[in-house]
Amino acid sequence: MKKIITIGEVLVEIMAEERGNGFLEPITLVGPFPSGAPAIFIDQVAKLGQPCGLISAVGPDDFGTVNLERLKADGVDVSAIAVIPDAVTGSAFVRYREDGNRNFIFNIRHSACGQVSLDHGAEKMLGEADHLHVMGSSLFSDEIISLIRTAVERVKAKGGSVSFDPNIRKEMLDFPGMREALVHIFENADIFLPSGDELFLFTEAKEEEAAIAEILTRGTKAVVIKRGAEGASYFDASGETRVPAFAVEEIDPTGAGDSFGATFVTFWLRGVSPEDALLMANASGARAVGVKGPMSGTSTGAELEDFIERHKGTRA
């Protein structure tokens, strides 16, 4: 089985229990929950029984231990997650507003994962990788951008594949070096997994059909559009495959897109049909939103099959 790796932030998430605007008064908090988009992604891959690993860093603290123990228990190769003395593990304080949007206070750039480097553990894992998944949210420093560019080049040079979830605001495209880094990753991606307007980040076209055609003519093998409550679509040279979502109660959407992407990529690499891969990915995202905590809703294959069986009549 192919080994999937990713690179980026590992952190804990601490959530406000009451909805409201920001953190300007004492409120009840719950956590820490293991988190970080790459960590959620790779945990979901591991739960499906796929060989996988993460290149990152944590501090020698309880927050780092919470993440390492969770990832290791679920089957992730954590040998390339460095424990950096005198650094602290990343964190995110989150509060939901009444309109469903969120307020965040992050400590990522100046945390341990902001010091990720191409050390011995990272070198070894890159040598074992068959597939690299890249998330735009992880491009938060020059050092990690350089590491991810190196990883893309090495994986592609030995015949491996790359998937890319942009997961980034358009405003970030103006950061120094950001657009160049994103374009480099996009141009080397075999699978592109955008949501909403992210589809148009790298195209002249501003309509979906034309944008997809433009992307596919530039070397990308497949485009997977995450449509939230409307399900998801897969596009390749042969056309579109669309699979509806499951109608479920949303408790916490954080991490659902990461779980979706991890599930789709895993089954795609196993040679599963696009329709079946999307079905499993939709189930993965649906299970994730029904649980509080960004990594709490990752699923095994058996859990996904059981969910699909029990929710046959709930697809939108």
Image: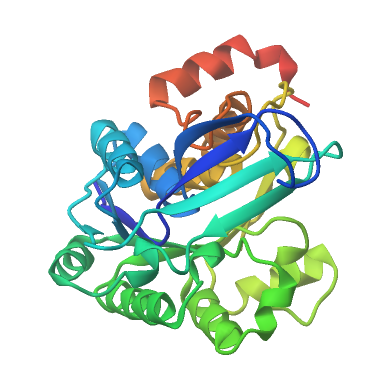
Residue 226 in view here: no
Percent coordinates x, y for residue 149 in the rendering: 39, 80
Residue 86 in view here: yes
Instruction: Write the residue at 31% across / 41% down.
Output: 62
Locate the C terminus by quadrant.
top right
Percent coordinates x, y for residue 123 in the rendering: 17, 71
- Viewed as shown, does residue 28 lie left or right of 315? left
Q: Is residue 128 above or below residue 14?
A: below
In front of the other: 229 or 2: 229
Q: Quadrant of residue 16?
A: top right
Q: Is residue 78 above or below residue 175?
A: above
Percent coordinates x, y for residue 290 in the rendering: 62, 24
Percent coordinates x, y for residue 305 in the rendering: 48, 19
Q: Quadrant of residue 307?
A: top right
Q: How are the colours assigned in the image? A: rainbow
Instruction: Write the residue at 32% across / 74% down.
Output: 151
Instruction: Write the residue at 60% across / 36% down.
Output: 15
Instruction: Write the residue at 17% across / 53% down.
Output: 79
Q: Quadrant of residue 194?
A: bottom right
